[in-house]
Image (cartoon, rainbow, N blue to C red):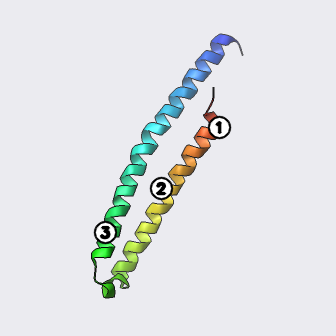
Amino acid sequence: MNIKERTIANGRLENFVTAVEAETKPMRSFLKEMRDREEDKLLSMPDSLQDSPTGQSIEEYMEMLDEKIDAIDEIESEIEASFGSF
């Protein structure tokens, strides 16, 4: 690969990393906000309702959101490890 091709490849890689970061950061914030709202909803319920099917459903949804947030963190770590330096 010559210098011109390397420059093109590096530019495209930088654009790729920028595009991924532009999507992952707002998505993480959005998911965290949703998770916080669900947690507030659960904590505002009487204790007797927190163990009800509705409360359990909220907890399951919170766990799913946590998994998605963790997945985004993993994606960012992998991108940084794989494409961190050009």
The x, y position of residue 40, in whole percent, is 31, 69
Nearest to the eye among marks 3 and 2: give it: 3
Is residue 36 found left or right of 66 in the rendered image? left
Q: Answer above or below: position of 76 versus 11.
A: below
Q: Residue at the spot x=59%, y=39% of the render?
A: 80
Q: Earlier in the sequence, mark 3 or mark 2?
A: 3
The x, y position of residue 44, in whole percent, is 27, 75
Secondary-structure class at tag 1: helix
Q: Quadrant of the C terminus?
A: top right
Nearest to the eye among marks 3 and 1: give it: 3
> Which residue was labeled with disc 3?
40
> Which residue was labeled with disc 2?
69
Is residue 69 found left or right of 10 in the rendered image? left
Q: Earlier in the sequence, mark 2 or mark 1?
A: 2
Q: Earlier in the sequence, mark 3 or mark 1?
A: 3
Q: Answer above or below: position of 16 versus 33.
A: above
The one of 38 and 44 positioned closer to us in this rendering? 44
> Which residue was labeled with disc 1?
82
Q: Amino acid at mark 2?
A: Ile
Secondary-structure class at tag 2: helix
Q: Amino acid at mark 1?
A: Ser
